[in-house]
Image (spheres, coloured by chain):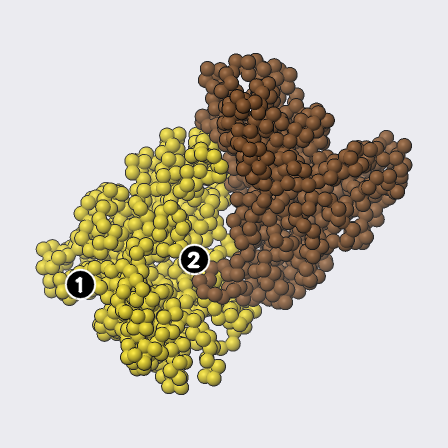
Chain colours: A yellow, B brown
Amino acid sequence: MNKESARKKAKELIAKMSTEEKVSQLLYEAPAIPRLGIGEYNWWNEALHGVARAGRAAVFPQAIGLGASFDPLMVRQVGSMVGQEGRIKNEIYRSEGRRGIYQGLTFWSPNINIVRDPRWGRAHEAYGEDPFLTSAIGTAFVRGVQGEDPEHLQAAACAKHFAVHSGPEATRHGFNAEVSEQDLRQTYLPAFEHLVKDADVAGVMSAYNAVNGVPSSCSSYLLRDILRGEWGFDGYTVSDCGAVHDIFERHHFTDTKVEAAGRAVSAGCNLNCGSMYGYLLEALQKGFVTEEAIDEALENLWTVRFRLDMEGDADGAQTVDRWLRLSPKLYRLEEQAAEESLVLLKNDGILPLKNPERIAVIGPNARSVSVLEGNYHGTSDHYVTLLEGIRAEFAGSQVLGADGCHLYKAQIEAMSHVPDDQLGEALALARACDVTVLCLGLDPSIEGELGDASNEYGAGDKPSLLLPESQRRLLHAVLDASDRVIVVLLSGGAIDLQEDDERISALVQAWYPGALGGKAVAGLLSGRVNPTGRLPVTFYHNHQVSWDFEDYSMKGKTYRYFEGRPRYPFGFGLSYRYLQLSEARMEDECVHVLACNPHSAAVAMPLQIYVSWNNPSLAAPLRQLAGVTMIRLQAGEQKEIRIPIDSYWLSLVDEKGHRVPHEGEILFTIGDHQPDERSCELSHEPLLRLSFKAD
Amino acid sequence: MNKESARKKAKELIAKMSTEEKVSQLLYEAPAIPRLGIGEYNWWNEALHGVARAGRAAVFPQAIGLGASFDPLMVRQVGSMVGQEGRIKNEIYRSEGRRGIYQGLTFWSPNINIVRDPRWGRAHEAYGEDPFLTSAIGTAFVRGVQGEDPEHLQAAACAKHFAVHSGPEATRHGFNAEVSEQDLRQTYLPAFEHLVKDADVAGVMSAYNAVNGVPSSCSSYLLRDILRGEWGFDGYTVSDCGAVHDIFERHHFTDTKVEAAGRAVSAGCNLNCGSMYGYLLEALQKGFVTEEAIDEALENLWTVRFRLDMEGDADGAQTVDRWLRLSPKLYRLEEQAAEESLVLLKNDGILPLKNPERIAVIGPNARSVSVLEGNYHGTSDHYVTLLEGIRAEFAGSQVLGADGCHLYKAQIEAMSHVPDDQLGEALALARACDVTVLCLGLDPSIEGELGDASNEYGAGDKPSLLLPESQRRLLHAVLDASDRVIVVLLSGGAIDLQEDDERISALVQAWYPGALGGKAVAGLLSGRVNPTGRLPVTFYHNHQVSWDFEDYSMKGKTYRYFEGRPRYPFGFGLSYRYLQLSEARMEDECVHVLACNPHSAAVAMPLQIYVSWNNPSLAAPLRQLAGVTMIRLQAGEQKEIRIPIDSYWLSLVDEKGHRVPHEGEILFTIGDHQPDERSCELSHEPLLRLSFKAD
């Protein structure tokens, strides 16, 4: 139902509840209240890139890969499929009387934190390092998930983690992120602001960490003043799981658990993922929270539940029929999204591969299903690993697969102390084949979340941007054995191959590409797929990441502030075929540009519009992405493209955190890639430049 | 080279060695001796069902599945492929200068222990519970691996674990198996005897356990008197890994490590998998071993190394070419072996499946690669899981896969305490589909070897024959939801589904079926494959396995001594099509029988010949398998089949362990299945009976 009716109904319901009943409804495992006709509901559900942890579901590329698509329209379709499949799965579970965790419709996705540091283990859950791109992709995803029918909330998205959250994982429960008002408003908050204002996101999750001394889950500055006051948010808020407990136990911000629970609700944290709100009755008695604050939280929560209409009868058989009718669309979009997520970083001409007789497909990620999934994933029933994809794609070639080495240990299976136990085989295969595809990188057991990732790398963060040593040795040795080596990196972010980067023939960044990732990568290798993905994060040289991991100042970080020359810059990526651009102009707050496809096949190319400030009155980023769109032209087609530019992204933030419309000259750079020397050199396309004087 | 030349060369070499050099060569990681032109060699290599732990290799069905084929000729081909691929892999590693563990040609396979107890975690490494079948399959495997060219040992097999070894795993390092001479000779030793005498197996591995008080690795009764004295073994012996250490540390059979090392060599244990023979110099000084005993051990070892001709130059590229030419044969045999390993235990007529519109493929083993591999496995580059196989086989149907439950935990991915978190989805799918294929069972992380298996089930043995609870709940609930349920069990041995066995429509025992297992299972379901596998172990009712796991008496155990009615008997298995048998007669120590194929397609059927004794003079088994062969007839073909019967299997063993030719009347039962009421009833074919009076 619509918001207004839902809120009215929520108020009526709350008026009938006892205080004990009220408190019970503020926990994520909200119990049934039979006397009020209320069923139980579990608020904890996940759908980062497909309905997650609930069994069979589409597995789209991990979020960072969706960011790499630079294609909000496609991501909106992904979101829409997630919402539709989520509703189907919810009905299926309900038809069997199940209302447990991961079976509901309040998805705690997306993760729109800014990838401030490439070492962060959860970086792959986010859309990259740029506030604009994160806003654009995140908004598209949320709109897709929630649908756009004001009378019907398809599913509820939730923007997380609010705010200023990007590692380290190991200390996250007690960490205090110190951030200037300028960085807060210029970098960390814009995506949240846009998801609230532009996508009407139904939920916001508060982070584990404190921001400038106040734990996020009891920060009325964040949860009331900014979120509801400035931005007009009217949805529900939820603590990250265990975050209310952290207020007392790890941040030592309150003297008791009771106070922590009370202050969290008072500060505007509506729902507790955890059990601390069990202390709320005591907190009420002790004056740490008022019944009005509890009612307010309840109203926000129950408005969302009513908007979701989850109480009707569900017919399992009919729902499975609906699911099967949806399946072909899900498959097609899994494949398209995977294709669009791939970033071709280097190609000396070896790609596309021309009828190789023998292909060696080597590496610990060649036959891994885990690297297709990433984290917070569903379970596909039609995974295609890289090895399987390449074998199917190159049906006329002999394809030889081998692990070559363990993902990060010295040996694969040897019981005695022989490092690189299967390296010899890998080298012999590389020597004997026309071309070697090395499938390297990390996997979600190496980079991830505190508690999820369990290995020598520690809490989930990465110690550096280098490959694990076993893989460095494999890469180096294979390069000594063959001069036709293509590296496919499966990882959530930047990997620096160091000097070996110069020796490889081609480099594909494939992230965690989802169920059909192997088919997509194989299509790129064969040329069936024209790569269009672009980097949503800077790929630094390892030595360039020398700042303190706990330093939340943006100075010198990300393409917007980093003045060095990275290995591969933000926005970079090669295609086999490009569109030609010309005649750029600014009109009605839109960039207009003429795009032409000179090829005899349909071609897509992402258009990137960067702004930079001439003599800015305030400290400004070096440049700022302010527009993206995927241009798709038929063979020979020519078309004028119009991209609206939101003046928000032309404005700058002063030291006190006030956003000030910029008044000087702004330079627009329009094309593929950002205006960086190296990327220009490699883009094969001149970038159009446009100067614009705001008034 | 041939044995004689090799032994001569070995003697010459040993004569040049210092005592220190001699000792160094008795360790499994034998170092190079440059002054004698000797390279390093690692004796530890595995090839239980394909070259194992050495990277890319064919993965044939786990040993128990090879046993289930009842087809020694096919298993001989498997052995031959293992030997050929092993040699290729050895040359590939040598071409890269690698001589580490798992890269050599002395394979510590097969495992020919008798599956005395279905709870044994390593039961799936063996060929079943019957001495004859184990001898026949084991002999075929070894002949295949080693080749039959007296001038050239293709690879060296090794019979293990000598002797009387079948669990428990948890206590194996200090366990004393108490066994009567009668059981020893009638049950535990025959397979070893046959591998030595009929297959000329190159190696024998001594077990961890003691036998009647003497640790196997220092038992001169086993290693000298029986093995070399009685059977004429002239190969090498090796301790199981760590077993020499166990003599002192776990069996407390010697006072020092030095004595343990010395006594092991003295007793005839030639090679040490471990490091204890590092004490041999000290043991020499202290008189626990003589230099002659050391020379004898060296001679056996170096004779095998010279017979294997592993020192020449290896050309990697040419070897990879050879490998690729072999690959189609490897693939075909992987598929054939998988097909022949499958045992159809129940079919109410649902199979073969007739054009189902929708198939639900549910269960924790549906998309598992680990269940294809079993343990001691190689790595395939073309696995086909059950789900993948079924999807490909039923291309005209909608195939929906879901895990349904975790293999043994209460939940798959839920963070809160909701058991059976994905059961609801499984039930909805089962209701919405024409038929449900439930892929249940164990995997090598649940049943296996001490140290390998790491789960709640303990050391690798099974607590019972029941499915893990999570799967029992899934099975039961799915049966409530659908009346068309086919269960495919992937496990290394007997599973008792209890009352739910009565409710399922069909039951397929698939063991751990190898790389192409999913394709083979799908072929059985569609009818493309006519199942011919038969049980190599008794499938007891769970309550029937009530004896002490440590009791090594054969009384009441296995089909030869068990008088109850099991759930499915040894030798049992259904086919879609059978051959007709008639006109059985005994002539020239052979059974002759006329086989006829009344069908319009080629049909194969395993022939089983059991003997039983009328009024035996000695304690005799209830019955004894004494002949197997796979009969293959073209459509309409009729053929007289001739199966030699070795009088060994007609003889009986007295209480002192002497094998005595039997003199009374012997009843031969010839057909498919053993002469058990239930199996006869189900076989659809009358069994031919033949009475024979030996003189």
Count of numbered circles on the image = 2
Q: Residue at x 31, y 52 (%)?
A: A120
Q: Residue at x 55, y 16 (%)?
A: B14
Q: Chain of mark 1?
A: A
Inspect the image, locate mark 2, and give the three-letter code of the amino acid beneath it: His
Where does label 2 land, which residue? Answer: A377
User: Which circle's residue, 2 or 1, is located before the other in the chain?
Assistant: 1
| Above or below: residue B435 compared with residue B613 | below
Q: Quadrant of the N terminus of chain A?
A: bottom left
Inspect the image, locate mark 1, and give the three-letter code of the amino acid beneath it: Glu
Residue A607 seen anywhere in this rendered image of the structure: no
Q: CA distance from mark 2 to mark 1?
A: 35 Å
From the top left corner, tell me how far across and down residue B336 is, in percent. 65, 41
| Above or below: residue B187 compared with residue A123 | above
Mark 2 secondary-structure assignment: loop
Residue B592 seen anywhere in this rendered image of the structure: yes
Left or right position of A553 against B625:
left
Q: Residue at x 50, y 53 (%)?
A: A382
Q: Chain of mark 2?
A: A
From the top left corner, tell me how far across and down residue A145 is, in percent. 39, 66
Where does label 1 land, which residue? Answer: A181
Are labels 2 and 1 on one chain?
yes
Q: Nearer the viewer, residue B290 or A84?
A: B290
From the top left corner, tell me how far across and down residue A638 is, in percent. 30, 54
Residue A345: give its label. none
Q: Residues within 10 Å of mark 1 (few under 14, many from 20)?
A: some
Left or right position of A287 against B437:
left
Q: Nearer the viewer, residue B220 or A233?
A: B220
Image quadrant where residue B597 sits: top right
From the top left corner, tell me how far across and down residue B36 is, in percent. 49, 15
Mark 1 secondary-structure assignment: helix
Q: Residue at x 58, y 15 (%)?
A: B11
